[in-house]
Image (spheres, rainbow, N blue to C red):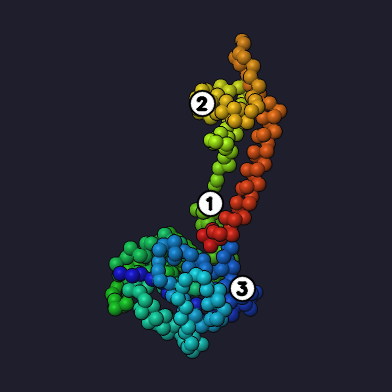
Amino acid sequence: MKTGALILASADYGRELLERGEAPVFFPMHVLDGVTVIKREIAVLRRAAVSPILVLTGHEGEALKSHLVHHQVLCVENSDYRRQEWEETLLAGLLEAEKHMDRILVIPAEYPAFSKELVLELLSCKKPAVPVYEGKEGWPRLYVPGREREEVERIPVEDAGCVLSLLEENGLLRAEAYMRRQRESNALGFRFRLVLEKENEFFGPGVYEFLKQVDAAGSIQAAAARMNMSYSKGWKMVNQAEKEMGFLFLERNKGGKNGGSSMITEEGRLFLEQYHEMEKALKQAGQKFFEQYFREYL
């Protein structure tokens, strides 16, 4: 069975929000925690592999369609939205959605704080279902055409986001704070390793950290112990770097009464500083590209 989604975004939402100065634009296009409300909803559905996604438009319909032009959603205009009560709008959306999907996840645009995990839990249900948080019914809800008379399954959930409406007083602030907490606790991130090479790789984060530990501890043996590696492995890494670069990273003093010691050479220290500065610059540039290309998932 094909399970898709219906986002109800046709009404003249949020006149109260405009009057209170909380949302300066038609709020499905309002930026909330770095991405617009409706794009955030679509991104969560995509991560749960929900397709197709139908958006019921009306008020500001052309602007909304333009806003979503590259998001591969089906926009259907609800020309009667001004005269409709909520139940009539829902019915109009369901009738359109039935043409494209067998089961329908319904999301009013004013409920954007739901999670992918909640969507997956609803998808596992065999009959119509509604999430319930602390006794309050939330969104999305699962509709199954032709089975409207069946008892709706009430799914207890721990996702408070499903009951956060942007139309409630301070709804935008509450939803944004909730989504920020969720993002920070389960944030998408990126990482990379700066590795230097000639014919073979010879210098990366491991060698850099080992040399820093030698500098702090004063010996290869102590640095190896701090990094939980063998003495011979530490020697091998340093020797390979020195061979490739053609200069000494460490000045070794043979052991006496208290054992041998090692210290970073001036040339080695300069090399470490340059490596660190390049790594820092790449991370800063990488963060900008990460936010540019993955903003909707943050």
Secondary structure category for the residue under label 2: helix
Residue 49, relative to residue 74: is it above or below?
Answer: above
The answer to whether residue 210 is left or right of residue 162 is: right
Residue 278 in percent (x, y) is at: 65, 43
Q: Nearer the viewer, mark 2 or mark 3?
A: 2
Q: Amino acid at mark 1?
A: Gly
Residue position marked by numbered label 2 in the rendering: 233
Q: CA distance from mark 2 to mark 1?
A: 31 Å
Q: Taking the image as drawn, is residue 141 in sight?
A: no
Residue 16, quarter of the rendered image: bottom right
Earlier sequence position, callout 2 versus callout 1? 1
Q: Earlier in the sequence, mark 2 or mark 3?
A: 3
Q: How far separated are the C-alphas under marks 2 and 3?
A: 60 Å
The earlier-in-sequence mark between 1 and 3 is: 3
How crowded pointer 1 is (Cα within 10 Å; few <14, some 14-19, many 20+) is rated as: few
Which residue is at the front of the view, 83 or 233? 233
Q: Position of residue 168 (x, y in %)?
A: 54, 72
Q: At which x and y percent is residue 146?
A: 29, 78
Q: Amino acid at mark 2?
A: Lys
Residue drawn where x is 36% and y is 79% of the image: 99
Q: Secondary structure at mark 3?
A: loop
Residue at which label 1 appears: 189
Q: Residue at x 51, y 66 (%)?
A: 40
Eyeballing the image, is 232 above or below 148?
above
The residue to which callout 3 is attached is: 23
Instruction: Give x and y (percent) for residue 221.
Output: 56, 21
Above or below, 128 against 256 in this view is below
Q: Are marks 2 and 3 in contact (CB under 8 Å)?
A: no
Residue located at (68% from left, 36% from top): 273
